[in-house]
Amino acid sequence: MEFEELRQLFRDVFPGSSPPECCRAPGRVNLIGEHTDYNGLPVLPMAIAQEIRLAFQPRDDGRITLSNVNPAFPTVAFQNAPKIPASAAGSWENYCKAAVQGVNAALRPARLAGMDVLVSSTLPMAAGLSSSSALVVACAMAYLRAVGVRLGDDLSRLALAELLADAEHYVGTRGGGMDQAVILNAVEGNACKIDFFPLRMENAPLPDGCAIAVCDSTVKVNKSGEALHRYNAGPRLCALATALVRRQLHEDFGEEVELDRLGDLWFGPLCLTHAEAEELCMRAVDKPRMTLAAIAARLGCPPEAVRTRWLGDLPEPPDGFPIQARVRHQLTEYRRVEMARDALLAGDAESFGALMNASHESCAHDFEISSPELDALVEAARDAGALGARLTGAGFGGATVSLIYEEDAGAFIPAVTEQYYRQFLRRTGTPPIFIAQPGPGADYVA
Ligand code: NG1
């Protein structure tokens, strides 16, 4: 829905209101660097043209009413408060609650304002395109207006991205800060390499003539619903790996060494090289699989303590947890992101594509976030001539990204349709593929 129509509709949905303001927040695809952000290791995403659009109007009484032009999302209202009770897992209003509570906690506004909000979207939900973070960002931008904070003047875009990365944990996922960072800071025509703690961004355009083909596997992943536990297994095992590495450092140095996340090996006071970090990690996690009992013995604490502190309800596989493979993915993916950034800066499409392919293999085998559908779709894209193809985002379903020459799109789309959508999914009709160029970040719309 265009903004003009959205403004009109707002006045029907909220009768008696004055003309609303509008803002937009784009979706994103990650080109390389998967499940690395929450470890403090870099990622390389780009914003896309599909976006969440909001019409909104502040109110004085602290009442927040959310309505959606899509009737699948029921209208909800709640009272603003320092601690806002969450709705049932998977409820769409939780993303707005996350944004409002996050801004309240970080900025402590003098008055907890309310707002009426009408949401519309050109961004498919649960397709790995970060519709959830786009909604969080858009709601936060609307709420900033309600509490009189000017984005870019009173609060920088990087600071808002950092605070919203934490705020989104409200919905139960333990994600990193990639999505909020790229959604708020993307620059049209550029992908961006993002580093964390503190947040830093570096822009790089796609190689000449190239575009990203985004193919929806059509397997939906509701990360705040049933897929929550599968997603959180990544952060949980990485946090446990960090504890094992910290233990190893303690043994090596005879004293406690601070290590909050794996990325601190390179960026913290330790400042290790890749080779040193690899050598240390492989000594700390020296078996392909570790049982709960073995992990507890290594950490010097009872198994129940390991469960409570790191694993939660993650079931123990019969042959133990595959922590070594998870760590290997982090180590190799970090290197690939660095090389991918260099390839973009050098305009080297072939190298960038090869790194995307290698990333997919690592996501599939070492991080185990792929699925038969994603593997088949990646293979179809490569067979159709992509320079590189991989799953994008949290995994388990959602979309793939392929680097192609834009002029080849006309041949790429029917070839992938024939191989994946017709054969693998036995579907016909318009294939859920779009060709993307890096889009701009979120903004208010005049
Ligand atoms: P998506 O694909 O939007 O669910 C999630 C996390 C990211 C990152 C990726 C995997 C959130 C909001 N997003 O993204 O931080 O960890 O998975 O690379 O949790």
Image: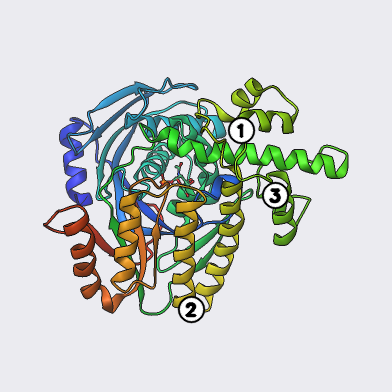
Residue at disc 1, secondary structure:
loop
Q: Which of marks 2 and 3 is in front?
A: 3
Q: Give the spatial CA distance, label 3 vs label 1.
A: 17 Å
Q: Which of marks 2 and 1 is in front?
A: 1
Beta carbon of the mark 3 residue lies under 8 A of ligand 1: no
Mark 2 vs 3: CB contact within 8 A: no
For residue 354, above or below residue 199: below
What residue would you read off at disc 1?
Answer: 291
Amino acid type indicated by mark 3: Cys
Q: Nearer the viewer, mark 3 or mark 1?
A: 1
Q: Residue at x 69, y 50 (%)?
A: 282
Residues 412 and 55: in front is: 412
For residue 343, above or below residue 286: below
Residue 259 appears anywhere in the view: no
- Residue 266 x %, y %: 71, 55
- Residue 258 x %, y %: 76, 40
Q: In which quarter of the image is residue 254?
A: top right
